[in-house]
Image (tube, coloured by chain):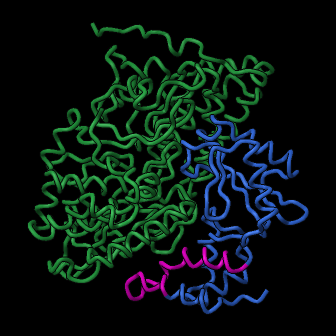
Chain colours: A green, B blue
Amino acid sequence: MGRKLLLDKAHVDGIRYYDVYRREGGYRSVEKALKTMSPDAVTEEVKKSGLRGRGGAGFPTGMKWSFLAKPEGVSRYLVVNADESEPGTFKDRYLMEFIPHLLIEGMITSSFALGSNRSYIYIRGEYAWIVDILEQAITEAKNNGWLGKNILGSGFDCEIYVQRGAGAYICGEETALLESLEGKRGNPRIKPPFPAVKGLWDCPTVVNNVETIAAVVPIVNEGGEEYAKIGIGKSTGTKLISACGNIKKQGVYEIDMTISVEEFIYSDEYCGGIANGKRLKACIPGGSSVPILPANLLLKTAKGEARMMTYESLADGGFATGSMMGSGGFIVLDETQCVVKHTYTLARFYRHESCGQCSPCREGTGWMEKILLNIEKGKGKMSDIDLLWDIQRKIEGNTICPLGDAAAWPVAAAIRHFRDEFEWHVQNPEDCLKRNYGLAGYADPLKVVTPA
Amino acid sequence: MSVQFSEKAMQEVQRLVGRYPEGKHKSALIPVLHLAQQEFGGWLSTETMDYVATVLNLKPIEVYEVATFYSMYNLKPVGKYLFEVCQTGPCMLNGSDDIVAYIYEKLGIKPGETTADGLFTLKTVECLGACGYAPMMQLGKNYREHLTKEKVDAVVAECRNTAPPKTDQ
């Protein structure tokens, strides 16, 4: 049984409400920080913890905080990114729905560290009912003296507001999120300047994911060094994984980063194996943007080692044979699923969500969607596969924000690892409408190539 | 329909504007458009957008460019009940195509269409963050998850029988 730092109390009866949350030890990190620590000391603990951003990029949180500019007389802001929109990802929703005070507590402590007197939660518009849950938690926190003026007599003032988006994946990108919070279209900004210098309303701003800010609570309570003892290497602490697709037990799991991918999929503590007695074909381990891997490369790295649920191990082999931890959106495909069709739905998603600023992304995502649909419907040509490869290569790295890369990577990985499935669709235009390609050799043991 | 916020809605606008520093009231635009859509028939007409511009002291173009960017704003009238069925990867793996097909079989509407009685509109949407509870749809403020044909039947019956307010988003 792995350690749980965020969700250990998530199912205590009534934990959504202040009284129960407080009784269970809630808001201790605020007391500790405001009464016994300086803001810089809190940042120092976060640095020591090795915490990495849980939204997808995995950037060290303490370092991000230390970049925050602090010019005299200029407001600073903490903005929590609750725009969770990466297909396969539903962990922040779970945390906010079941244990909202953990986010509020983490925000107060983090706001103190950063000197933000007015902090915002930017939440995707579709999570409308969670807005009510958060606003109630904020009201309760305020009524009990954890928000407002001169909190705990520390001289620190803080207010938290919930801002609802209106349906746009791109607003999960931090500068698009800030544009949206300013009441504009969610068009990502050109960087630099980074938000740490020029963010919300041109003021220094830190944007962090929900799970990242929640993790600040155990880090301050237990100390950064204790937190860093959990996990392997630079993958410290616990990570929320939202598991979905064709597994027996879909849901949100908190793992400490010491278990293997195989254990995560097959053990009863987590996904419980593949649903309906089927076999594993492929998996996208970190949200739709990260490379899809066939079963054999998912469970073992190209070196033949067991692949672990850590940032480093999931990325082992680079994009040639590895993938990424990303947001922790773990999508499993069984042997009856069609990789071409799945990739088509993702391409359609990125075309729909492209903001339209950069031509490679705006045009390229639409072309990829059309070509993939053609291949899926048995109307593709062999040259279409190379054309797809060419288009994705011309999007990657050629856009203002990472949405271009996010749209390119799934297509690239699907062709890289499942090219024979694409070719089968082209060569069997009638058959592919009636049945899928199946498991083929995707679960066969890998030939381990030892470098000479 | 004359476009004018009720007194209660106006108070909500004031509350929203009060969440930002002095002079940053434009930040209230997205939440106020949600409110307007809820108050004025579930969609945003040009008249509604112009009215929101007046209320927030913005230029109409500032409102149009935002309203046309975000997928939750309806720029055309929709039925009394809007079924927004997710069809992205994880929902597809769990049979969202069958749900869309079943809604067509049952109500005779394809994505983007509204039933003749004006009760139901079907819209397919991209990932709503319910991948572990697929297939699913959004109805008003809430999600309906783990959909089956039987659950779709129940939702349709519920809409026909109870007739709650059109949108409470």
- Between A412 and A440, the residue placed more toward the observer is A440
Residue A60 lies, with reference to residue B39, above or below; the image says above
Question: Which residue is rendered at x = 49% and y = 10% of the image?
Answer: A444
Q: Where is residue A203 in the image (x, y as percent from the top left)?
A: 31, 74
Dividing the image into 4 quarters, which one contains the C terminus of chain A? top left
Question: Which residue is rendered at x = 75% and y = 49% of the image?
Answer: B152
B154 left or right, relative to A57: right
B106 left or right, relative to A13: right
Q: Is the magenta stretch mostly helix, strand or loop?
A: helix
Q: Does the magenta stretch include residue B38?
A: yes
Q: What is the magenta range?
A: B15-40
Question: Which residue is rendered at x = 50% and y = 22% of the image?
Answer: A294
Q: Where is residue A152 in the image (x, y as percent from the top left)?
A: 18, 77
Q: In which quarter of the image is residue A145?
A: bottom left
Question: Which residue is rendered at x = 33% and y = 67% of the image?
Answer: A19
Q: Does the magenta stretch include residue A202?
A: no
- Between A99 and A303, the residue placed more toward the observer is A99
Q: Quadrant of residue A364?
A: top right
Q: Position of residue A352 (x, y in %)?
A: 62, 52
Residue A438 lies, with reference to residue A37, above or below; the image says above
